[in-house]
């Protein structure tokens, strides 16, 4: 009976084709460190380093890393810390959850035909969930490169942001109408205690709740 149960379980897993993945650092510049789950300290990363689930990735000043995970590519900007909370593939589907603790990332999700790739980037105050698009996200601002994103603040009223446009959460906690901006205008969060030259309307409280979703 026990052998039969194990056989059925194995066949079920094979049928669903569910398996864990790992990311790989494709390129890096400057000071990039990794802290695998359970490790006591960070270690220097290099091109080709594996980024498994719950591994923390940290970039220093003027440092970047490009991480490839299935059909998704994450460009980690300077002074950023994140971890891959979930990396999973099943038959015709990929799921990637990224925990963005601080900093800024660019996410490119381009699944092959017939495959769905779901990527979620979470920060202390925001969540960005996408399928097959490209955008930059710094926990408060969104800058869309490809596709169309519904960007909402705490009130839940979305602002439609298309390729070449950007949006942010205003001081009232609401998403402003999309505005066309240069990619370089999306700035990383200022260090705690530092002053910022950005307009006050782009600065939302930590309690803001952002939701980004793809519109087909």
Image: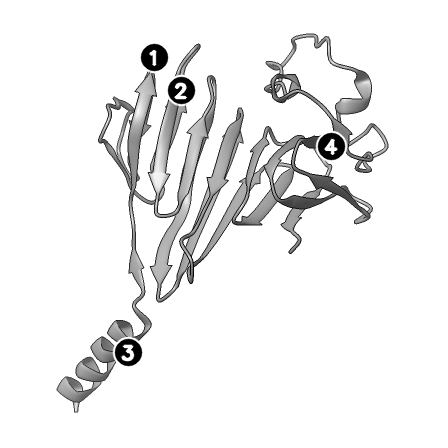
Give the camera-side residue of 178 and 23: 178
The residue under the point 43% across, 51% down is 111
Asked whether disc 1 touches disc 2, contact meaning CB atoms under 8 Å apart, the reply is yes
Q: Secondary structure at mark 3?
A: helix
Residue 167 is marked as 4
Residue 101 is marked as none
Asked whether disc 2 touches disc 3, contact meaning CB atoms under 8 Å apart, the reply is no
In this view, the residue farthest toward the left is: 3
Q: Earlier in the sequence, mark 1 or mark 3?
A: 3
Give the camera-side residue of 205 and 15: 15
The residue under the point 81% across, 29% down is 170
Give above or below for 97 relative to 169: below
The residue under the point 53% across, 42% down is 121
Which residue has dot 1 on it? 30
Residue 103 in the image: x percent, y percent?
53, 24
Give the camera-side residue of 66 and 216: 216
Q: Earlier in the sequence, mark 2 or mark 4?
A: 2
State the separation of the CA atoms marked 2 and 4. 24 Å
State the separation of the CA atoms marked 1 and 2. 7 Å
Estimate how packed mark 3 is, as few (under 14), some (14 to 19) or many (20 or more) residues with alpha carbons within 10 Å.
Answer: few
Q: Secondary structure at mark 2?
A: strand
Estimate how packed mark 2 is, as few (under 14), some (14 to 19) or many (20 or more) residues with alpha carbons within 10 Å.
Answer: many
Which residue has dot 3 on it? 12
Q: Earlier in the sequence, mark 2 or mark 3?
A: 3
State the separation of the CA atoms marked 2 and 3. 41 Å
Which residue has dot 2 on it? 64
Q: Earlier in the sequence, mark 1 or mark 4?
A: 1
Q: Earlier in the sequence, mark 1 or mark 2?
A: 1
Residue 146 in the image: x percent, y percent?
59, 39
State the separation of the CA atoms marked 3 and 4. 44 Å
């Amino acid at each position: 009976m026990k052998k039969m149960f194990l056989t059925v379980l194995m066949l079920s897993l094979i049928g669903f084709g569910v398996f864990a993945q790992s990311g790989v650092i494709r390129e890096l510049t400057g000071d990039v460190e990794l802290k695998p789950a359970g490790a006591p300290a960070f270690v220097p990363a290099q091109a080709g380093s594996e980024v498994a689930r719950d591994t923390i990735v940290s970039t220093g000043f003027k440092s970047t890393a490009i991480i490839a995970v299935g059909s998704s590519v994450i460009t980690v900007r300077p002074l950023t810390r994140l971890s891959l909370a979930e990396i999973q593939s099943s038959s015709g589907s990929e799921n990637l959850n990224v925990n963005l603790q601080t900093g800024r990332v660019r996410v490119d999700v381009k699944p092959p035909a017939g495959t769905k790739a779901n990527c979620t980037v979470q920060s202390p105050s925001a969540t960005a969930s996408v399928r097959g698009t490209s955008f930059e996200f710094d926990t408060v601002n969104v800058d869309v490169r490809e596709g169309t994103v519904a960007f909402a603040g705490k009130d839940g009223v979305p602002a439609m942001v298309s390729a070449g446009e950007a949006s942010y959460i205003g001081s009232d906690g609401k998403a402003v109408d999309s505005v066309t901006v240069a990619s370089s205008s999306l700035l990383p969060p200022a260090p705690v205690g530092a002053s910022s030259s950005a307009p006050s309307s782009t600065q939302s409280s930590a309690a803001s709740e952002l939701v980004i979703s793809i519109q087909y």
